[in-house]
Image: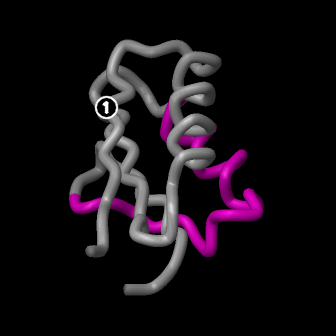
Amino acid sequence: MDAVIQIDLHGMSLDEARDALDEALRHADMSVYRIRAIHGFNSGTALRDMIRREYRWHMKVMRISRGQTDGQTDLVLREY
């Protein structure tokens, strides 16, 4: 069964968000094709920018995609 992992990063520091994303990537098995990071956008873009900058070249991430809203970023692990 294909899966999307959603992680709500609202209110987290950059280090906390990084830890949460790293944990999700470590535990993502072959059923997971996408990790959706919900970072918001009303309080600034620091989380979004960090995700798009640091995870673009992660070995498990095929590509970074804008989410369904400006407050989301998807880490695409494989095509479904």
Q: Quadrant of residue 59?
A: bottom right
* Identity of the residue drawn at 37% across and 86% down: 80
Q: Is residue 18 above or below residue 61?
A: above
Asked if residue 13 lies in the magenta stretch, the reply is: no
For this orientation, the residue located farthest to the bottom is 80
* Identity of the residue drawn at 36% across and 13% down: 11
Q: Is residue 70 left or right of residue 30?
A: left
* Identity of the residue drawn at 29% across and 50% down: 70
**Percent from the top left, x then y, of residue 75?**
50, 60
For disc 1, the neighbor class at 10 Å (few under 14, some 14 to 19, many from 20) is some
Q: Name the residue under label 1.
A: 8
Chain part drawn in magenta: 47-68
Q: In this view, does 57 lie above or below 1?
A: above
Q: In which quarter of the image is the N terminus?
A: bottom left
Callout 1 amino acid: Asp
**Percent from the top left, x then y, of residue 65?**
45, 67
